[in-house]
Image (cartoon, rainbow, N blue to C red):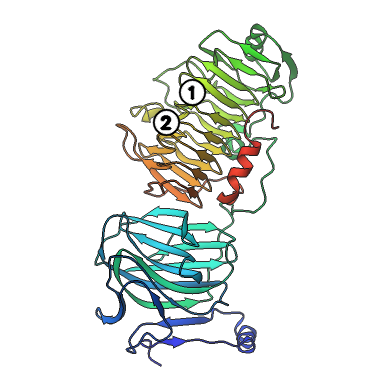
Amino acid sequence: MSRRHAIWAVLSVAALLIMMATTGAQAATLLTDDFEDGNATGWTTSGGTWALASDGSGVYRQSGTSSDARALAGTATWTDYAVQARVKPTAFSGSNRFAAVLARVQSSTSYYYLALRSNNTVELKRLDSGSSTTLDTASVSVSAGTWYTLRLEVAGTALRGYVNGALLTEAADTRWSGGRVGVATFYTAANFDDVQVTTEVTTPPSSSGPPTSEPPAQPNVADGWAAVNAWGQNGTSGGAGGATVTVTSASAFLSAIAQSGPLTVRVQGMLTLPGPMHDVTSDKTIVGVGSGSGLTGGGLNVGLAIDDDITAPPANAVHNVIIRNLNFRGWPDDAINVQMFSHHVWIDHNTWTTGSDGGVDIKRGSSYVTVSYNHADGTDKNMLLGHDDDNGAQDIGRLKVTYHHNWFDGTEQRNPRVRFGDQVHVYNNHYNDTGNYGVASTENAGVIVEGNSFENVEDPFHLGEGDSGNGRLVARNNCFVNSGTGQTGGGVPAVTYSYTAQPCAQVKATVTAQAGVGRI
């Protein structure tokens, strides 16, 4: 039979078992249609204007631009498969319109879909009873009159979207385990050709930390970039191996954090510091006692004095510092500042409420830092990574920071704002009611935004900010509730450490229950 012919594969269970036994479970073709046979048998349509047409070869054309439209095929018993089609948008009516392929279709209002949008994005989405959720998004050039090959794979809970053979979106979702296939448009005219459904799906790699349904155990040791062996330091242990002191006054606290050598400093109660910043030396753990301990009136500086002439990590850079379980209030400069090539710093389970500048600023070549399980409660200039567009000499190739399981609760901006940092990993954080924006990637920074939960956030992430040039940003497996979908662009290498990401749908519950003081 010619390739240019509709082939509908109806496989009995017995036939499929025979095929698997004799071919080693090779991929089966469930459906192919190239629309050369002059009919659209097997397709059911809703909305739009559908007809067979010619565009160099036979195509299935949807010519309406005044509504959404779908054409469905296949059977409800199909489970794990890949649906692929060549798609040519021919006209967009308005902005942010799309053409799509559909998988695991339950009805005309419930399915997964991979949408090629007129705003130069591709989105992996779930439509559930007419309510859409963006699972992942990526940038791709889209123009009317151009053919694109869209491929949507569904295997177990794994969903993966390809454009022209490149994997651009992926997510995990448990809503549906099987269903029909389809093609669709939204206020868009488009031609569809060479539709194919096979049981061949790609096994997702595990090195990047596949999503899991289990809430992660809160770490009692540093993870992320702070756990990486680099710059002469293997992991972040803070004051381990040294003495432990409990301080109840500002003077005792300032004396303890200035000592040389490993030391664990337990902060008992709220200590009022003189402003603005106070130096922390290497090999220190600073931890609050209970849920009511912390610092007010001043902040902590982890780093040597500023020196623009130093452009490589010095041997005496401050390193191996842990700051956990502290309330920060009323700081006049920064709550925590990490600078001058400081490395292996773990900032975990703290709460910021009021202050005049940054909650956590990391700059001037500092690297191998993890910021985790913190609660930023209504702060403005929240987390800055890289302080100036002209500081590339110190920052390029450095500023490697992991931000995970933080609660950005009604914050304004800089969650984080990144300059130059590469392989900055922002994953499994919860953002709600953000005033200005969530994440900004600027000055050729490379940021991975993965598995986060955005709720009531108009601008979750974008490229460039103010006078700063664009960075690179890859987004995957994020959830958006009453939120925008963000701006992506460029490529970012995978992080080199192991981690396990939660599905974004579980992040809000985990983070709001576990982030902040009193929860370790």
- Above/below status of 53 relative to 256: below
| Labels 1 and 2: the sequence-earlier one | 1
* In the image: residue 247, left or right of residue 55: right
Residue 257 in sight:
yes
The residue located at (54%, 30%) in the rendering is 376
Q: CA distance from mark 1 to mark 2?
A: 11 Å
Q: Name the quadrant containing residue 224.
A: top right
Secondary structure state at the residue bearing disc 1: loop
- Residue 513, image x and y in percent? 65, 38
How crowded pointer 1 is (Cα within 10 Å; few <14, some 14-19, many 20+) is rated as: many
In contact (CB < 8 Å): disc 1 and disc 2? no
Name the quadrant of the C terminus.
top right
Q: Name the quadrant containing residue 407.
A: top right
- Viewer-proximal residue among 481 and 142: 481
* In the image: residue 128, left or right of residue 118: right
- Residue 34, image x and y in percent? 36, 82
**Residue tagged by mark 1?**
339
Name the quadrant of the N terminus.
bottom left
- Residue 321, image x and y in percent? 61, 25
Q: Which mark is residue 226?
A: none
What residue type is disc 1 on? Gln
**Residue tagged by mark 2?**
395
* In the image: residue 429, left or right of residue 488: right
Secondary structure state at the residue bearing disc 2: helix
What residue type is disc 2 on? Asp
- Above/below status of 242 relative to 123: above
